[in-house]
Image (cartoon, helix red, strand yellow):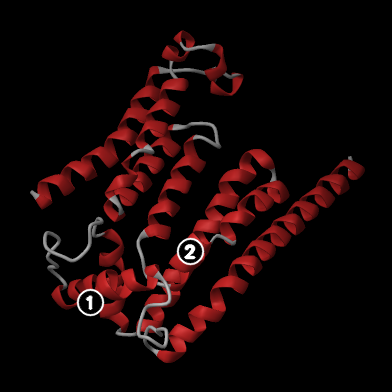
């Protein structure tokens, strides 16, 4: 018994060590690419440009011409921001969150650091999702290309809605695709998916994964081809289908509210 306890303790310590190794490796890769430019932006207190006045990146241009303007507009209009008329073709969720922080702090550097943390969160969320099936180390290796992606790095340096919306997508898929479906995960995935729609309305599509995951835990799954069935879906119940549909309904309601809001 003592040997078994020692082995369990050793395995637990090894797992913790692997988790920290993967975490440090991912954040190091992301940080090496992100922090030099981010620190320059924060230090200068304004967006730096090329010698001819052009923005150094299209993402930087989006920040200065659209997203920062909307954040400043919402910040000035709080507690009643105009969610109908603002200079962005996306949902207002990201801008509203940043506007609250801007109103509380009045510090642009804090906004940029918060935006960078969202980018880091996207990388870690993908690692969390993949590690459920692939393991800690393999999950980190699979998430590494995202950590080094110019799409994620630029969205971490400059304020855009992309990383936040994709963070919501990855969390939804991590809850209902990479893990066994439960009622709690179904509802949580629906809430996160609705938040993603509030940030970028095009990301309504993960609701299909939420509803389908609930269906796979229901008796209807027996009517599907064998490739969709697994022993992990037992026991099946109609309640799971209800929870899956409830989770899928939340982002639809959010999308409907935005359509109504924008007329």
Q: Residue 80 bears which disc, if any?
A: none
What residue is rendered at 25% in x and 79% in y? 103
* Residue 238 image position (x, y, % from top left): 38, 18
Quadrant location of the N terminus in the rendered image:
top right
Earlier in the chain: of badge 2 and badge 1, it is 1
Q: Is the residue under label 1 in contact with that under label 2 (CB below 8 Å)?
A: no
* Residue of label 1: 72
Q: Is residue 11 above or below residue 88?
A: above
Residue at 55 percent of width and 60 percent of height:
149
Residue at mark 2: 119
Residue 170's place in the image compared with 248, above or below, is below
Q: Residue furthest left?
A: 263
Residue 62 falls in image quadrant: bottom left
Crowdedness of circle 1 by 10 Å Cα count: few (<14), some, many (20+)?
some
Q: Is residue 64 above or below residue 150?
A: below
Element type where label 2 sits in the image:
helix
Total residue callouts: 2
User: Could you tell me which secondary element the residue under label 1 belongs to?
Assistant: helix
User: Foreground: 177 or 145?
Assistant: 145
Residue 188 versus residue 248: which sits nearer the camera?
248
């Amino acid at each position: 018994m003592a040997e078994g306890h020692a082995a369990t303790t050793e395995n637990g310590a090894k797992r913790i060590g692997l988790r920290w190794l993967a975490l440090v490796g991912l954040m190091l890769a992301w940080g090496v690419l992100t922090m030099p430019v981010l620190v320059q932006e924060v230090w200068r207190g304004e967006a730096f440009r090329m010698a001819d006045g052009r923005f150094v990146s299209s993402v930087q241009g989006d920040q200065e011409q659209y997203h920062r303007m909307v954040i400043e507009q919402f910040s000035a209009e709080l507690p009643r921001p105009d969610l109908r008329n603002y200079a962005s073709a996306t949902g207002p969720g990201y801008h509203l969150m940043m506007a609250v922080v801007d109103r509380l702090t009045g510090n642009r550097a804090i906004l940029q650091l918060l935006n960078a943390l969202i980018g880091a969160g996207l990388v870690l969320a993908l690692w969390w999702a993949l590690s459920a099936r692939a393991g800690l180390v393999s999950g980190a290796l699979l998430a590494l290309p995202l950590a080094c992606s110019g799409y994620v790095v630029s969205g971490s340096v400059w304020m855009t809605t992309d990383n936040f919306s994709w963070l919501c997508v990855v969390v939804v898929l991590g809850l209902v695709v990479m893990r066994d479906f439960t009622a709690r995960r179904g509802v949580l995935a629906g809430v996160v998916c609705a938040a993603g729609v509030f940030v970028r309305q095009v990301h309504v599509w993960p609701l299909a994964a939420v509803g389908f995951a609930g269906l796979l835990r229901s008796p209807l799954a027996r009517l599907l081809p064998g490739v969709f069935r697994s022993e992990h879906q037992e026991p099946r119940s109609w309640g799971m289908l209800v929870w899956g549909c409830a989770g899928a309904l939340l982002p639809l309601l959010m999308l409907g509210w935005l359509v109504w809001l924008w007329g």
